[in-house]
Every structure is written in structure tokens, then in C-alpha cells.
Amino acid sequence: MHMLLKQARHFMRMHATMENGVLLVAALIAASLLWNTVNSLQRNFQLQQQVDLTKQENELIALENDTLEFQKRYYQSSEYMELMAREKLNKIAPGERVIILPPAPEAEAERAARAPRQERTNFEQWLYFFFGEQKEQR
């Protein structure tokens, strides 16, 4: 224990000078300034992200408002009212004729989709994979 105290005293005499004390204080001040600068930069970055997000939200809301204003003007227009009168009340304009068309014939794709498919065997599937439609034409 006595030896440890001697070593500590020797260390203090050799290294505890005024210059080293000033350097230590300067290093602590520099570290504190660096720490505060990094914290300020991080805080500013986070605040800028919030500002950018708020601007985007404001632009989106402004766009939605413009869209709603356009829809409002459209729904108040005479063209829309005429269109709704024709659609809902079955009204026609003077000189128009109503033509009732028969139902459209069933599309070929729909018929093919509903038609029962013939399942291929595993061997036939491999032949089709390698040779395509050639196997079917033979």
C-alpha cells in the first residue's frame, strides 16, 4: 500500500503541472462545445424533418381542397344537373330518341373461362413445356 502511495505522489509531481491543468480544462471545454454542437445539429435536423413533413401535409391538404372545390363547382353546374335529370328521372333532351339495345353477346374470353378445361398429364405438360403447341398439332 505504501508503494502505491509513493507511485501516486511521483505521478502527481511529474504530471500535475499548471500546463497540464490548463490543457485538461481546455480539453473539457472543447469536448463540451463539441457535444453541444452535435446535439444542436441533431435537434435542427429533426426539426427540419418535421417542417418538411408539415409542408408536405399542407400541400396535400391544399390539393384536396382544390379537388373538392372543383367537384363542388361541377355538381353545381347545369351540365351535371342535366346529366342527373337524364339518368335518375329518365329525361331526354328535345329531339333525342331513346334506343334500347339488346344485351351484348357473351365475350369469347368469358366462354372459354367457363368451359371445362381438359387437364394434361404430367408427361404432356413436360412436352408442352419443351415443344409448345407443336405437340398439340400432331
Image (tube, helix red, strand yellow):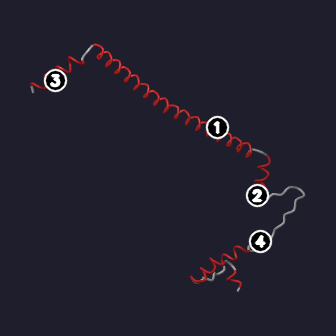
Quick one: label 2 or label 1, which is nearer the N terminus?
A: 1
User: Circle 2 is placed at which residue position?
Assistant: 87
Say which element carries label 2: helix
Say which element carries label 4: loop
Residue under the point 64% across and 42% down? 64
* Quarter residue 85 falls in: bottom right
Q: Which residue lies furthest to the left in this view?
A: 2
Residue 112 in picture, x, y percent from top left: 69, 77
How many residues crowd mark 1 within 10 Å: few (<14), some (14–19), many (20+)? Answer: few
Residue 15 in picture, x, y percent from top left: 24, 19
* Quarter residue 102 falls in: bottom right
Q: In which quarter of the image is the C terminus?
A: bottom right
Residue 106 badge: none
Q: Using the numbered discs, state the Cα–Cα distance from disc 4 to disc 3 in whole angstroms.
A: 105 Å
In the image, residue 118 above or below residue 28: below
User: Circle 3 is placed at which residue position?
Assistant: 7
* Quarter residue 101 falls in: bottom right
Quick one: label 3 or label 2, which is nearer the N terminus?
A: 3
User: The residue under label 4 is which amino acid type?
Assistant: Ala
User: Circle 4 is placed at which residue position?
Assistant: 104
Residue 123 in picture, x, y percent from top left: 58, 83
Q: Using the numbered discs, state the Cα–Cα distance from disc 3 to disc 1 in whole angstroms.
A: 74 Å
Looking at the rendered image, the disc whose residue lies closer to the viewer, 4 or 3, is: 3
User: The residue under label 3 is which amino acid type?
Assistant: Gln
User: The residue under label 1 is which amino acid type?
Assistant: Ala
Q: Using the numbered discs, state the Cα–Cα distance from disc 2 to disc 1 in whole angstroms.
A: 32 Å
Quick one: label 3 or label 1, which is nearer the N terminus?
A: 3
Looking at the rendered image, the disc whose residue lies closer to the viewer, 2 or 1, is: 1
Q: Quadrant of the N terminus?
A: top left
How many residues crowd mark 3 within 10 Å: few (<14), some (14–19), many (20+)? Answer: few
